Image (spheres, rainbow, N blue to C red):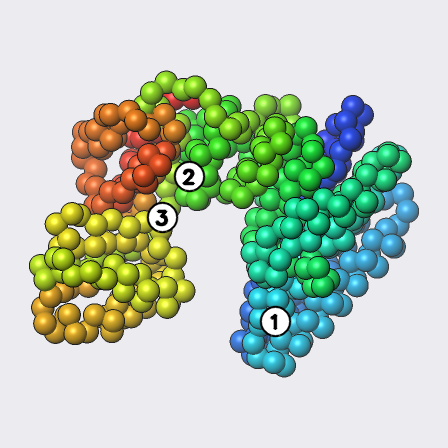
Amino acid sequence: MGSAAAIKQCADIVIRHAKSENIIAVVSAMQGVTDILVQSVEQAAAGEGRHFKNNAEVLRRRHFETVAGLNLRDPGIEIKRAIEENIVEFVTLCHAVHVLGEVTPRALDAVVALGERMSVHLLAAAICQSGQQSVAVDSGDFLITDDHFQHANPDFIMAKKKALQKLLPLLKKNIIPVVTGFIGKTKDNVTTTLGRGGSDYSAAIIGNILNSKKVTIWTDVTGVMSTDPRIDATARTIPRLIYREVAELAYFGAKVLHPKCIRPALENGAELRVKNTFAPDEAGTEIVPDMQQPPGTIRAVTSIPNLSLITIAGTGMLGIPGVAARAFAATAKSKTNILMISQASSEQSICFLVKEKKAERVIALLKLEFAQELKNRDIDAITSTTEVVIITAVGAGMQYTPGVAGQVFSVLGKNKINVIAIAQGSSECSISFVVSMEDEKKAVHCIHSLTQN
Ligand code: ASP
Ligand code: MG
């Protein structure tokens, strides 16, 4: 949903499929809009009184220009009014947050949900434009969730009951519902969201509760790729992936589909595909529960750059229980996500990876936590190695297959790439290792040359 042209393209796809199937379209916000909403409310909470007002203007212009770009037969007055209502709400909410000087997860959800509440009208209008009936539907009307704001969990039973009432009558009348992704409501009618990138999850939930035959995630790349094409131009679309492989890939930064969407989509035996809006005839990637594959196959490789490796080292750490727990608790205090952990069985050191910009704060907190141990020299040093990257090789076929790690590390060795740390999840679906940023490209190339699809 990046531009009027992209929305028209989405409408074409919907209409084409609607000729032979019942379609429900689930939309995300226009590209970048959710980020603007998040920033606005955060800035308002931090005491900035002007930022959100400027952004209201940015959002209005962006959506109104898109309405204009759709060249609607009627001048789009209704849609503009609906969008304007959301913008007024945006300003009101940001203003309240600004006055209070803080933002709760609940208020944040109320604001970020507005992106989808605006975009939904655009696609519905684009579909109507070509003579097919369509209406915008607020998923808050049926997608009941708990009150974990920012990461709400659907109540499948309640949602099903309400979705059947709301959506089936539309489908029966041949009206295509265009539904807001990402958002729900508690049973007390308070807006929630399912987590960033959650519109895929919404589609899967709706597919699940309506027993759909297909859930297709339309994005701007052709399915899930064997690596990032910007790093390795020989990257290919992977035709089929299994559930567990996607989970590993999604976690390690391949942002094509939300990991939570897989289970509800596949549970009822639906076909789950990731396809490219701009190349709709390409098959994309199919996600299946399981499949036979040659032992030892590496399917894809990902990298997460701009990380720091934090190391806590000391001969006195041996056998002291709780060092890891205390280290992670101290790290959690700085609201830092740990991306990988590795500890050797000698227990002389423990290391983990965090985003580079968090490293300084984490080290400070660790030094505070372990002040006594540092003084006693049980811990010799708490240090960070900056400019490192995690490279991950993914493939369910690596499970139970000896020699894959050997293959991975010998190709790195042959190419003179120094490996700083290693970790393998016990699912054996992936092997991760850390190299310096300057080796990122070369390491991705090396591992990618081992992939098979
Ligand atoms: N608009 C939401 C986000 O940016 C949900 C989504 O795009 O899937 O996170
Ligand atoms: Mg997405």
Dot 2, how many residues are within 10 Å of its Cα: few (below 14), some (14-19), or many (20+)?
many
Q: Residue at x 61, y 80 (%)?
A: 100
Residue 131 in which image quadrant: top right
Q: In whole angstroms, how far apart are the C-alphas of marks 3 and 2?
A: 17 Å
Q: Nearer the viewer, mark 3 or mark 2?
A: 2
Q: What's the amino acid at mark 2?
A: Glu
Q: Residue extending furthest front? A: 157
Q: Secondary structure at mark 3?
A: strand
Q: What's the amino acid at mark 3?
A: Pro
Vertical position of residue 154 compared to residue 215: above or below: below
Vertical position of residue 293 compared to residue 61: above or below: above
The answer to whether marks 1 and 2 mark residues whose Cβ atoms lie closer than 8 Å is no
Residue 184 in which image quadrant: bottom right
Q: Secondary structure at mark 2?
A: helix
Vertical position of residue 118 compared to residue 441: above or below: below
Please give left or right for residue 444 compared with residue 108 in the image: left
Question: Mark 3 sits on what residue?
Answer: 305
Percent of width and height locating residue 235: 43, 29
Q: Nearer the viewer, mark 1 or mark 2?
A: 2
Q: Secondary structure at mark 1?
A: helix
Question: Mark 2 sits on what residue?
Answer: 248
Vertical position of residue 429 compared to residue 449: above or below: below
Q: What's the amino acid at mark 1?
A: His
Please give left or right for residue 97 compared with residue 295 in the image: right
Q: Nearer the viewer, mark 1 or mark 3?
A: 3
Q: Residue at x 81, y 58 (%)?
A: 82
Residue 204 in which image quadrant: top right
**Which circle marks residue 286 in the picture?**
none
